[in-house]
Image: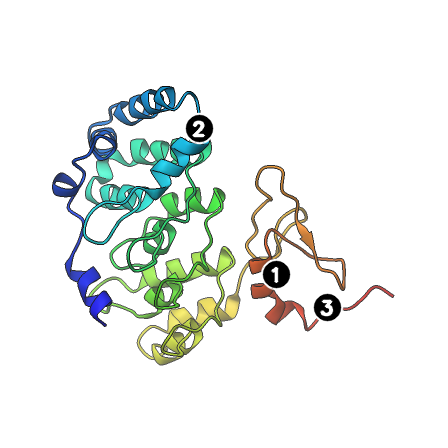
């Protein structure tokens, strides 16, 4: 309870918190459209004698503000504050995830990743950024310190806002391999929340019942993602018919797959 209260009242303020060289370069790039971040990366790479792995680790481990916000979470905040710079911000996100290879699963003090907040609906609904993070390996099922996924936030509807975005984000969550049965520390999962909200937001139940789209060959059966880099898809050991990008996805999909999973005759 104390952590939740602290996190909700202690937001990162870019001008106040991004005062170190990396923070300044990041803010200048995202708000002014400069190449300051790339210049920082090039200079730091030279200092490290070309050690790109160490550089990526440094950027991944960096945190700002009272809630210890990692780099992609900072990008999400600046995207929310500066929507006119969306193209530059998304370009920078791709640069960090694809070229600099900064891992995308960093979390703030609550254990929430940038992908978690990007589709949480409170206050963000930034699917373009979420898709870049997802394509780079982020999981919609990554849990916070409260043992909840972003679906917990989506399911707790703010009736003062447009509830259609909750439907849209829940649809995005499911389509990208979201676990509808995962329970938080209070024993609640998104199915329970949707049932509780059914009279006021019936569209959420329709989204859950529809489920995800049919997968095409060559992608993960659960999240629909192609294997990253040199990785290969894992094959179901029993039926040999479906494949997954991670053991996490295999575990999430098992609840439905086990009904039809049979060993070859």
Image quadrant containing the C terminus: bottom right
**Is 126 placed left or right of 211 in the picture?**
left
The quarter in which the N terminus is drawn is bottom left
Circle 3 sits on which residue? 261
Q: Residue at x 59, y 44 (%)?
A: 226
Single out the residue that lies furthest toward the left. Answer: 16
Q: Which residue is mark 2?
A: 52
Which residue lies at the image location 30% right of the left edge and 46% below the top edge?
70
- Disc 3 is placed on an element classified as loop
Q: Position of residue 129 (x, y in %)?
A: 37, 44
Q: Are marks 2 and 3 in contact (CB under 8 Å)?
A: no
State how far apart marks 3 and 1 are (Cα): 12 Å
Q: Is residue 195 above or below residue 241?
A: below
Q: Which mark is residue 23?
A: none
Mark 2 closeness class: few <14, some 14–19, many ≥20 residues within 10 Å:
some
Return the disc, 2 or 3, that comes first in the chain's sequence: 2
Q: Nearer the viewer, residue 63 or 135?
A: 63
Picture quadrant where residue 172 is located: bottom left
Residue corresponding to mark 1? 250
């Amino acid at each position: 309870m104390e952590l939740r209260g602290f996190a909700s009242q202690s937001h990162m303020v870019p001008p106040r918190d991004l005062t170190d060289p990396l923070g300044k370069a990041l803010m200048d790039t995202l708000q002014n459209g400069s190449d300051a971040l790339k210049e920082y990366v090039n200079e730091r790479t030279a200092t490290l004698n070309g050690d790109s792995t160490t550089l990526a680790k440094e950027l991944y481990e960096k945190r700002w503000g009272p809630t210890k916000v990692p780099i992609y979470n900072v990008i999400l905040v600046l995207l929310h504050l500066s929507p006119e710079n969306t193209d530059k911000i998304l370009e920078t996100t791709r640069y960090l995830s694809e070229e600099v290879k900064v891992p995308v699963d960093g979390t703030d003090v609550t254990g929430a990743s940038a992908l978690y907040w990007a589709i949480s609906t409170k206050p963000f609904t930034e699917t373009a950024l979420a898709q870049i993070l997802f394509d780079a390996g982020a999981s919609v099922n990554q849990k916070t310190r409260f043992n909840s996924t972003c679906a917990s936030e989506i399911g707790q509807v703010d009736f003062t806002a447009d509830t259609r975005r909750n439907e849209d984000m829940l649809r995005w969550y499911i389509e990208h391999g979201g676990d509808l049965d995962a329970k938080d520390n209070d024993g609640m999962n998104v199915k329970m929340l949707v049932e509780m909200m059914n009279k006021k937001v019936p569209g959420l139940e329709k989204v859950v019942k529809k489920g995800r789209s049919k997968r095409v060959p060559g992608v993960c059966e659960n999240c629909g993602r192609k294997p990253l880099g040199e990785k290969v898809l894992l094959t179901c050991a029993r039926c040999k018919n479906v494949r997954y990008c991670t053991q996490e996805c295999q575990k999430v999909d098992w609840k439905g797959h086990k009904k039809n999973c049979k060993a070859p005759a």
